[in-house]
Image: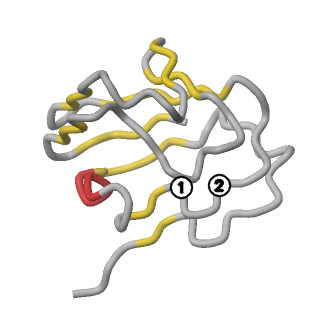
């Protein structure tokens, strides 16, 4: 999955997703598991991150949830071209944004 950012995004405690309890994922070649909260991660406007999962995941529920990751509003597009959906059974609230 390739995620493009239109604006700067700062993850001072590392890139995390509270819903990824079932899989370690790799961002731009750097393995970061759900417990890695020590390495700051910055994404600059116009850049992208590539997320690789170490095994097929079954759920993308609330994966882009602004309540847990305010940087979601900085995402300009997501490329699922080479994403393996063969094991996915749940995409409930894949994109959760707040309504102002």
Task: Decide if residue 90 is on the left or right side of residue 44.
Answer: right
Q: Are marks 2 and 1 in contact (CB under 8 Å)?
A: yes
* Residue labelled with disc 2: 60
Which residue does the image show at 65% across and 32% down from the upper left?
Answer: 82
Which residue does the image show at 36% across and 67% down from the upper left?
Answer: 67
Is residue 55 shown above or below 72? above
Task: Decide if residue 1 is on the left or right side of residue 10.
Answer: right
Across and down, in percent, residue 89 comes to: 82, 59
Q: Label 2 neighbourhood size at 10 Å, few (<14), some (14-19), many (20+)? A: some
SS for tag 1? loop
Q: Which residue is at the front of the view, 79 or 52?
A: 52
Which residue does the image show at 79% across and 49% down from the upper left?
Answer: 58
Across and down, in percent, residue 28 comes to: 43, 18
Q: Which residue is farthest top? A: 29
Q: Which residue is at the front of the view, 78 or 10?
A: 10
Across and down, in percent, residue 35 comes to: 50, 32
Is residue 88 shown above or below 15? below
* Residue labelled with disc 1: 63
């Amino acid at each position: 999955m390739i995620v493009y950012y239109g604006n700067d995004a700062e993850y001072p405690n590392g890139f995390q997703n509270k819903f990824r309890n079932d899989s370690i994922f790799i961002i731009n070649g750097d393995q970061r598991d759900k417990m890695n909260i020590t390495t700051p991660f910055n994404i600059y406007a116009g850049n992208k991150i590539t997320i690789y999962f170490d095994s097929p995941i079954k759920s993308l529920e609330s994966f882009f949830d602004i309540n847990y990751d305010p940087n979601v509003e900085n995402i300009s597009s997501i490329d699922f071209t080479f994403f393996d959906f063969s094991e996915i059974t749940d995409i409930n609230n894949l994109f959760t944004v707040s309504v102002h």
